[in-house]
Amino acid sequence: MCNNMMMRININMSVLVSMGWLLLFLWVCSSSVTASVSYDDKAFIINGKRRILISGSIHYPRSTPEMWPDLIQKAKEGGLDVIQTYVFWNGHEPSPGQYYFEGRYDLVKFIKLVQQAGLYLHLRIGPYISMQKFTEKIVDLMKSEDLFESQGGPIIMSQIENEYAPIEWQIGAPGKAYTKWAAEMAVGLDTGVPWIMCKQEDVPDPIIDTCNGFYCEGFRPKKSHNPKMWTEAWTGWYTKFGGPIPQRPVEDLAFSVARFIQNNGSFINYYMYHGGTNFGRTAAGLFIATSYDYDAPIDEYGLQREPKWGHLRDLHKAIKLCELALVSTYPTVTWPGNNLEVHVFNSKSGCAAFLANYDTKSSATVTFQNMRYDLPPWSVSILPDCKHAVFNTARISSQSSQIKMVPVISGAFWESYIEETVSADDSDTVAMDGLWEQINVTRDASDYLWYLTDVNIQPDEGFLRNGQYPVLTIMSAGHALHVFINGELSGTVYGGLENPKLTFSDNVKLRAGINKLSLLSVAVGLPNVGLHFETWNTGVLGPIMLNGLNEGTRDLTKQTWSYKVGLKGEALNLHTLGGSSSVEWTQGSVLAQKQPLTWYKTTFNAPEGNDPLGLDMNTMGKGQIWINGESIGRHWPGYIARGNCGSCNYAGTFKDGKCQSNCGEASQRWYHVPRSWLKPSGNLLVVFEEWGGDPTGISLVGRTIERVCADIFDRQPTLKKWHMLATGKVDKLQPKAHLWCAPGQKISKIKFASYGLPQGTCGSFREGSCHAHKSYDALKRNCIGQQSCSVSVAPEVFGGDPCPDNMKKLSVEAICS
Ligand SMILES: *[C@@H]1O[C@H](CO)[C@@H](O)[C@H](O)[C@H]1NC(C)=O
Ligand SMILES: *[C@@H]1O[C@H](CO)[C@@H](O)[C@H](O)[C@H]1NC(C)=O
């Protein structure tokens, strides 16, 4: 850039011979060398171009390298400029000084793919706790690969720390000092691009503070010259074992983004744009499910979630049409009525307007520059020329689709191996006084820790004659516990996300003499956020009481306990091809069923096609799954989702728990199997089941589109048409219904079509008081047998206007197969 300018300036110099020009040139060049990415309060400035940036989070370890190019491409087609990711310290430095950057952790490869797609990258390095060495390691790695924008790479900004202010607020002065230190340390690394800190109101200069939340329109950066950034616009929320599936309506998400942009916003990032999968035992926090789908625009399996993906793409196009006006001026705000607000960006570079209706129940009509605009409740219309409303956040014109999981392999031939129950006198146990914290003992090498002791019962105990067995009460810090007496399962208890602690309390069948008490304590994730979470305990910490003996109550807490980390099957690597041959498996009529602590294995051939794959685990309880030695994650379909799953209205302030589904069902039934982990034949599937389940009910399923729907008003112009109108190519605004099935599928049936006043939603449409009789004909003619089709939403297409005085719409449901 400076070289080009040098030539131009030289020519000018010969004419002007002006010292002023030379000074200007030196100033421009030196500032663009030190900061190819800069900003002001209205825009990011990248290599001289003022930008409003749309970003989305894709976490590289939550998918596979084989999925990355497609995810990035879908993000680009969805209108993103930037991909944002955390840097996963847990995966990159599994133990101090031991680094790993291969496979799903190949950060450099991921960033280079983003670069090849022509997108920018926002790198959230920010690990907490004595982090200087790791931050330097990552920055050096990025520099050595020329990945910062200042080096010609895609990284336009970085993050240090993460949502630290709530902790800082609790610990006071030392927290403040730490924030200052972290900021100085980061800035000292001289990356040539800006640093941000999220949720950190007291950021030291020159770090930019940013907002995370469901809404951020009211956020103001601490420094008035900083851009207004939203680093986490939550598209949904994470699923917890035991909880329903959280969803956020796209109408509300689009509304929140439009409000942010109309209030001076310059950068918005969707958290998540693709959520993906917590493979292995990496789930972020206690009781967090293996699926990290997040109701994101791209679903866990890598398919577009419609209409979320398409509606946001349309929003991004509308915002981009306003970009010149947005980066040039502040909005003028007026209030034409109750709950109505108009933002106008009027500058020499153009005029853009945002018309908002904040009422949660009523539509409204706004008159703006002598034109009338209809606004549904809780919505914003975007007018990139201050004349044409090309987009309204509550009117979806992209298609919606419904997904199905189709069994492709079921009824496999299974073999079983029962894990032995350990007891205190087994050779490979370690005896210690009292009860020990679980993670302190396991060092997270396994989810499992055995707590083992003997209970001596005298032959003269009363309960041996009257049959009133004593009550064993065990208090545990969590997260799940299986209680075995003399090798027999006595019961299972587990905590939940709100309270990981649990209590077992039940009569136990003890016999005279030595009884073997074996407690298998199971961790489900590590604490990951909160003040001093390193001190949060897991495991059986007591007290443990035996009640109803001749002596009254016996306290088992302080006696000698023996410990064993992990399972025998884990030590033998039963999940791998080599390890699985080290034990005798049983099969056929002696296949273990409904047996706790059982390993299962089978082999299968990869199904044809490209549909993403999953495992339907609904007949199983709790445990872990591996394919060809790769960990699919923890399964726990036995944990039934409890909560509120009522109806969901997009209008009104969204909060966690507002729109949930799946109550009364397994909180996670399906588990993603990446295609790239399969070979054509002989794939080894191993399941470890803690509770007891029926493996013959497990099936491999393909994820595919079942039906697609369109629901389009006849007066809402599509963006493409508006573009043509703006360039003078058409004189009439005409919306179109676009329908498309997955690659390899065709539209086989038009299940519903009505142009007029149809009612209902996708899957439950019905005709209303007005219906054009040729509605079906038009759709059948254009769509049957096609992978995709489009039909204009205009009266002549459907044999004339069935009710001329009404604003009509077209609703269509088509079956893909
Ligand atoms: C936009 O920013 C300007 C300058 O800081 C400020 O005066 C104005 O109130 C902001 N407008 C909105 C709608 O946030
Ligand atoms: C963890 O183990 C160490 C010894 O290895 C012990 O000193 C410490 O008290 C234990 N902490 C907890 C919380 O049990």
Image (cartoon, grey):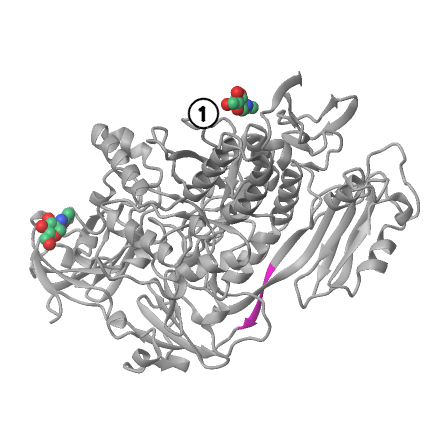
> Under 8 Å from ligand 1: the CB of mark 1?
yes
706 w.r.t. 544: above or below:
below
342 w.r.t. 645: above or below:
above
Q: Main secondary structure of the magenta part?
A: strand
Who's the residue at 55% across and 61% down the image? 70
Q: Position of residue 219 (x, y in %)?
A: 47, 28
Other residues around mark 1 within 10 Å, as few (<14) / some (14–19) / many (≥20) = few
| Magenta range | 404-409
Question: Which corner quadrant of the image does residue 491 belong to?
Answer: bottom left
**Residue 357 visible within the image:** yes
Query: Which quadrant does the C terminus fall into?
Result: bottom right
- Residue with the mark numbered 1: 224
408 magenta-colored: yes
Who's the residue at 79% across and 21% down the image? 370
> Please, what secondary structure does the residue beneath circle 1 have?
loop
- Is residue 813 left or right of 621 when viewed as pictured? right
261 w.r.t. 430: above or below:
above
Q: Nearer the viewer, residue 805 or 2?
A: 2
- Is residue 173 left or right of 59 when viewed as pictured? left
Q: What's the residue type where badge 1 is placed?
A: Ser
Q: Position of residue 111 (x, y in %)?
A: 45, 57
